[in-house]
C-alpha cells in the first residue's frame, strides 16, 4: 500500500508497478513501453518504513515496490533520505518501524538471506588499490563462498561485460576513475545477486565515462536478468535509465511514476530558458502574466526558466514584451518539460541548488590534525 501523500500520475504505471488507470490521462503523453513486466512479482517491497534518530525522522512512512527486472530510481537532494532508505533495505541499519522485503525475505528477520540476494555499490570507491583487478574480484567472490570453478567463470564473464579483460592483471591504482567504477560494478555482481543497489554510480565521472557506464548497466541487466535500484542526482541519468522514478524529499515519497508520466503531470508542456540583460525588479511577475505560463523560476544573473503550455506563443509574447520594455535578450531556448521541472514542481526547489549547498559545506578539522 502506498502512502496517501503520493500524487497519482496521468500515465505509465503506479507506485505498486501496475498500469495506471486514471481517467484524466493526458492525451498528448503516450505511455512509455516498459522494458520490465508491470505484472511481475515484486523483487523489493517497502511497507510504511520509518527511520528515526531520536526526535529526528530521516525516513517518514515510505512505501513502494520494485518489480523483477525493473530499473527503479530514487531521486532527491542530499539529506532527503535516499541513502538511509538504501541502508535499511540492505540490512546496514535497523528499521524503526515498517517492513522491507528483498525477494520475499524480511531484512529484519532474515538479514543473511536478504544479503545473499543483493549486490551493493556505494558511492565511494572501495576496491583495494594495491591489488590487481582480478585479485579484487577473487577476494569478493571468496567472501560470498562462490565455488572456485564458478568463481573463475563468473570473473571472466564479468570482466568481459565491463571491458576490463585486458586489465585483469593491472594494479587497481593504475586505473582511471571510469575503469575503477566499472571494476566496482563487476565486483558487486560476482556472487550472482538478483537485485543490484547502486548509489550515485556515475558521480565524479566525465561525460564519456558516464555514458559508457549507462550502456554497460543496460547490457549487464539484460545478461544477468537483474533488478536494479539506483540513486542519482543526475536528471538525464534517471530519465535514460529508469523505468520508474521515486522523488524523495525530507524523508517522504512525494511522487512516483514513469519518467514520461512524471513530466506529463507538470503543468506546461514546454520550457523556455531565457536570459535578459539587466531586467527590472518586477520582471518575474511580468513574465507570469504572459499567456499559457504556468511557472516562472528566476535562476539568477538575469536567467529565467518559464514553463508554458505553448512554447511558440509565449516566446513571441516574451520577445515583444522585452522589446517594448527595452530589455535586451541575451539568449533564449525552448525545450520540452524535463525531470528538473518535475523536481521543482513537487519539492518547490531545484535539485542542483540543494546539491550546491551540500557541496559548499566543509567538515571542520578534528583537534590535532594538521593540514
Image (cartoon, rainbow, N blue to C red):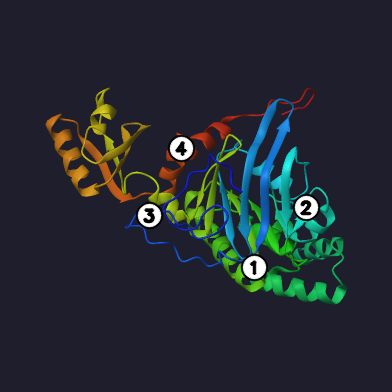
Neighbor class of circle 1 (other Cα within 10 Å; few <14, some 14-19, many 20+) is: many
Mark in the foreground, 4 or 2: 2
Image point (70%, 68%), residue name: 167
Disc 4 designates what residue?
350
Query: 361 and 286: which one is in front?
Result: 286
Mark in the foreground, 4 or 1: 4
The mark nearer the N terminus, 4 or 1, is 1
Q: In this view, does 113 lie above or below 75?
A: below
The mark nearer the N terminus, 3 or 2, is 3
Task: Quote the CA–CA distance across marks 1 and 3.
Answer: 40 Å
Q: Is residue 100 left or right of residue 252?
A: right
**Res 145 seen here:** yes
Disc 3 designates what residue?
25
Disc 1 designates what residue?
162
Name of the residue lying farthest toward the left? 324
Task: Quote the CA–CA distance across marks 1 and 2.
Answer: 32 Å
Q: Position of residue 175 (x, y in %)?
A: 67, 59
The mark nearer the N terminus, 1 or 3, is 3
Circles 4, 2 touching at the beta carbon (< 8 Å): no
Amino acid at each position: 500500500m502506498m502512502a496517501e501523500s503520493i500524487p497519482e500520475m496521468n500515465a505509465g504505471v503506479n507506485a505498486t508497478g501496475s498500469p495506471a488507470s486514471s481517467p484524466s490521462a493526458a492525451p498528448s503523453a503516450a505511455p512509455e513501453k516498459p522494458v520490465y513486466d508491470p505484472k511481475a512479482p515484486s523483487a523489493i517491497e517497502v511497507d510504511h518504513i520509518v527511520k528515526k534518530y531520536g526526535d529526528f525522522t530521516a525516513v517518514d512512512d515510505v512505501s513502494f515496490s520494485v518489480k523483477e527486472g525493473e530499473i527503479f530510481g530514487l531521486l532527491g537532494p542530499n539529506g532527503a533520505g535516499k541513502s538511509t532508505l538504501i541502508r535499511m533495505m540492505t540490512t546496514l541499519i535497523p528499521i524503526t518501524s515498517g517492513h522491507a522485503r528483498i525477494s520475499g525475505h524480511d531484512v529484519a528477520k532474515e538479514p543473511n538471506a536478504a544479503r545473499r540476494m543483493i549486490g551493493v555499490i556505494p558511492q565511494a570507491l572501495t576496491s583495494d588499490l594495491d591489488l590487481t583487478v582480478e585479485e579484487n574480484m577473487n577476494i569478493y567472490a571468496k567472501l560470498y563462498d562462490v565455488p572456485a570453478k564458478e568463481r573463475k567463470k563468473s570473473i571472466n564473464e564479468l570482466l568481459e561485460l565491463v571491458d576490463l579483460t585486458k586489465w585483469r592483471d593491472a594494479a587497481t591504482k593504475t586505473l582511471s576513475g571510469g575503469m575503477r567504477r566499472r571494476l566496482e560494478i563487476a565486483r558487486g555482481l560476482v556472487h550472482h545477486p538478483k537485485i543490484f543497489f547502486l548509489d550515485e554510480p556515475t558521480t565524479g565521472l566525465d561525460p564519456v565515462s558516464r555514458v559508457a557506464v549507462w550502456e554497460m548497466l543496460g547490457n549487464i541487466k539484460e545478461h544477468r536478468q537483474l533488478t536494479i535500484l539506483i540513486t542519482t542526482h543526475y536528471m538525464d541519468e534517471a530519465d535514460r535509465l529508469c523505468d520508474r522514478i521515486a522523488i524523495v524529499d525530507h524523508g517522504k515519497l512525494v511522487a512516483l511514476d514513469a519518467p514520461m508520466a512524471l513530466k506529463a503531470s507538470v503543468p506546461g508542456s514546454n520550457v523556455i530558458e531565457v536570459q535578459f540583460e539587466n531586467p527590472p525588479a518586477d520582471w518575474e511577475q511580468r513574465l507570469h502574466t504572459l499567456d499559457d505560463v504556468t511557472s516562472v523560476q528566476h535562476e539568477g544573473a538575469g536567467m529565467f526558466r518559464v514553463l508554458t503550455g505553448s512554447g511558440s506563443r509565449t516566446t513571441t509574447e516574451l520577445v515583444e514584451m522585452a522589446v517594448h520594455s527595452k530589455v535586451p535578450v541575451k539568449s533564449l531556448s525552448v525545450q520540452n518539460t524535463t525531470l528538473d521541472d518535475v523536481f521543482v514542481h513537487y519539492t518547490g526547489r531545484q535539485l542542483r541548488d540543494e546539491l550546491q549547498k551540500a557541496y559548499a559545506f566543509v567538515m571542520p578539522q578534528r583537534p590535532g590534525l594538521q593540514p
